[in-house]
Amino acid sequence: MMLKKIKNMIAQKRNSGNRFIKLSVSVLTHIYHMPRFVKRICFDPDFRYVRIMRLFHPNLVHQTTPVTCSNRYPEVFIECLGYFAGTENIRILSFGCSTGEEVLTLREYFPHATIVGADINKRSLKTCRKLPVDEKISFVYSTPKNLKELGTFDAIFCMAVFQRTPHHIANAGITDISELYPFDKFEKQIVFLRDMINPQGLLIVHFAQYSLADTCAASGFKAYGNCTQITYGLPVFDKNCKLIEDAPPFHSIYIKV
Ligand SMILES: C[S@@+](CC[C@H](N)C(=O)[O-])C[C@H]1O[C@@H](n2cnc3c(N)ncnc32)[C@H](O)[C@@H]1O
C-alpha cells in the first residue's frame, strides 16, 4: 500500500517542468526497475531481442512489440483485394511482418502474389523462416539496403508498425511523443517506402500514431476506399508530435499517384 503510494507520487512528478525533479524521477525509476530488467534480459529471449534491436538500430525501429495474429484486419485486406481485382501476379511487401501470420493471411487473400515479409526483429524472422510457405513467399531482414534490393511492389502493408508503446502512452496520458517516437522517423520511413511502390500501387498505413496525410509525401498519394483506423482506439498525434483530441480516424489505404 505504502509502496503503491510512493510509486504514484513519483509517477506524477515524471512530467514535472523542473529538470532536477525529472532527472531524479528518472534515476529512481531505473533503480526500481533494474532487478526485473536484468532478470528479463537473462531469461526472456523475446525481451532480449527487442532490447538488442533498439540498441543497435535506434533510428530504424518503429513499434518494438511483435504482437500479431492471423487475419487481423479483414476489412483492409478485402478493400485491397477489390482494388487489385483482375490483377493476379502482384508483388506485396509486408513491412513489419513479425512472426509471419500477416504474410500467411495475405497469401489467403492473394493466392498468386509474390509476397515478401520484412522485419527488423531477428527472433521473429527465425520463426517466419520455419513456416511452411510456397516458393513465392520470402522473408528479409529489414535494413534500408536489403529493402532496396527487393525492387518495387504493388502494395506495401504497414500494419501496427508506425507506433511506439501506444498503450503505455494512453495509460500515462502522454500528450507529446517527440521523445518516444518522433514524427520525423515516421515521415522518413514513408518517403523511403513511397519510392518502393509502383505507380498506382498501394501504401497501407494502418494502426499508426501518425497520419500519412501529414507527411511531405502526402501529395504523391490519393486516399482509396473507406478504411480508416476507427477501431484503433489509442491516442494519435500531429506532425508536431502533439496529441490530437477528437480527431476523425486516420485514413488507411493510399494509392501512389
Ligand atoms: C505489432 S507488430 C505488427 C505485426 C503485424 N504487422 C500485425 O499488424 O499484426 C510490429 C512489428 O514491426 C516491426 N518493426 C519495427 N520497426 C521495423 C522496421 N524498421 N522494419 C521492419 N519491421 C519493423 C517489429 O519488429 C514488429 O514485429
Image (cartoon, grey):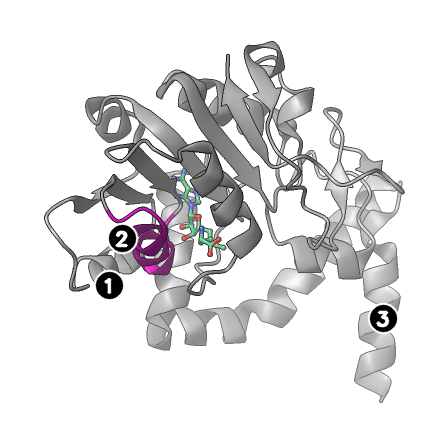
Residue 103 or 163: which is nearer the viewer? 103
Name which of mark 2 and mark 3 comes first in the sequence.
Answer: 3
User: Where does the image place residue 225, in percent across and percent down from the top left?
Assistant: 62, 34
Secondary element at image label 2: helix
Whether residue 161 is visible here, answered yes or no, is no
Q: Residue at x 54, y 46 (%)?
A: 76
Over which residues does the magenta segment extend? 97-111
Name which of mark 3 and mark 1 comes first in the sequence.
Answer: 3
Magenta stretch: residue 110 in it? yes
Does 27 sit left or right of 110 as displayed?
A: right
- Residue type at mark 2? Lys
What residue would you read off at disc 3?
8
* Mark carried by residue 127: 1
Secondary element at image label 3: helix
Secondary element at image label 1: helix
Q: Main secondary structure of the magenta part?
A: helix
Q: For mark 3, does the 10 Å Cα neighbourhood hold few (<14), some (14 to 19), or many (20 or more) residues?
A: few
